[in-house]
Image (cartoon, rainbow, N blue to C red):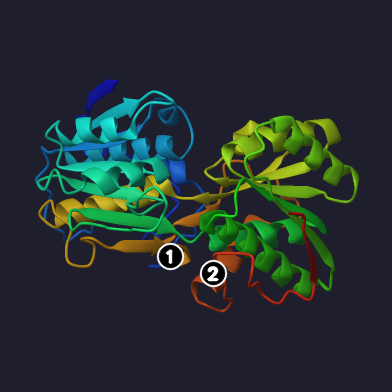
Amino acid sequence: MKKIIALILALAALTVLTACAPAEDTAAGGFTVPLDDASYVFTAPEDAAPLPGGATIALAAESTGLESGAEAMLWQGVQTFAANFGYTAQSYTYEPGGSAKDALQDAAESGASLVVCRGEEMALALYEIQGNYPGVHYLLFDAEPHNEDFTSYTTEANVHCVLFQEEQAGFLAGYAAVTEGYTGLGFVGSDEMPDIVRYCTGFLQGAQQAAEEQGEEVTLRVWYTGDIGDASVVTNRMVDWYNNGTGMILACGDDIMQSALEAVNQTGARAFATDWDQNALGERVLGSAIKCYNTAVQQQLYQFFAGNSTWDQNAAGKTVKLGYTDGSVALAGSAWRFSNFSQRAYERLYEQLRNSEMKVESYADMNTLPDTPSVVLEVQN
């Protein structure tokens, strides 16, 4: 399925709102702590030469991904950037169970200058076809091109990869939850993959920091579900946790979040979402620890087109990891449901992390973990 959207909105019609990214505050000349990824609109530096415009930017994704979630935020960013700087935005999609490779090939053969994509399916497809279209450039989020068994990684010069520091988003969630008063915590993820582990270990570190500051002792239960197939098993485990001392669970993954929603609706407890702003799912969602996809894609697109529609030597064939310093991870402020953890406290915490007054370590597996004397860890695998 192919959608073509040509956007020719006037630059004056776009207003920069509170953004999930660092922005120059003209009054203070400082950094704006991120809250709302959805409202971000990139503004070029005042002394920058105008971009040429006219080219096409394509997004390749599963069709359902454009409705909500990470791909939807990327698509919003592509469209916003195109409207702002005189480009055309196109989406090339495949149906669930279809071929990501076909969508990537359709996008590459469409004449697009740059193809944006995300995730492991796209990484597998891009591994195969990245060298077939040397005149096309790619921007891959949340993965790097690799083969089926993860034994070979190859990123050609026409590809640039963007990863997020999930441990930093997880830290914000853990700190906020304990500051809010939750001392019985849970973390549930689908697999013990590096990105999910980083959310978990960041969550652990944030809980430790807040517990130490407040003189509390916290318990954190951790479960990587694996391929269970029956979502009710996940829901029932969560219900059991909630009925036995767990007050809040960080749910990592869309299917896990759906189980968490069923569990909190049964028990009256709270859940915390990851990846994108899911606060609108209901009052029982305490918050969302997000990656700022809309923000990041607009910034990356500007870098590409400001570099004469090619990746420069710092980006070509390379991977960048975004986090606090770029304003690319955040707690979503669309619905602030914290009573004890204020937005001002969040802003102070963010600045401390950004200035390295606090440090968050990255762990890719559960074999080596940080020292957390104030948090009792129970891994239930």
Classify 10 Å Cα crowding around label 2: few (below 14), some (14-19), many (20 and above): some
Decide: is 57 above or below 314. above
Residue under numbered circle 1: 31
- Where is residue 296 shown, x and y percent of the image? 36, 52
Classify 10 Å Cα crowding around label 1: few (below 14), some (14-19), many (20 and above): some
**Along the viewing direction, whichever of 153 and 216 lies nearer the viewer:** 153
Q: Amino acid at mark 2?
A: Ser
Q: Please identify the quadrant where the C terminus is shown.
A: bottom right
**Along the viewing direction, whichever of 196 and 170 lies nearer the viewer:** 196
In terms of image quadrants, where is residue 317?
A: bottom left
For the residues bearing labels 1 and 2, Cβ distance under 8 angstroms? no
Q: Which residue is rendered at x = 49% and y = 46% of the image?
A: 36
Q: Please identify the quadrant where the N terminus is shown.
A: top left
Q: Amino acid at mark 1?
A: Phe
- Where is residue 53 shown, x and y percent of the image? 12, 42
- Where is residue 328 shown, x and y percent of the image? 44, 57
Q: Is residue 234 visible?
A: yes
Mark number displayed over residue 20: none
- Where is residue 204 shown, x and y percent of the image? 68, 64
Residue under numbered circle 2: 362
Q: Is residue 41 rendered to the left or right of residue 317? A: right
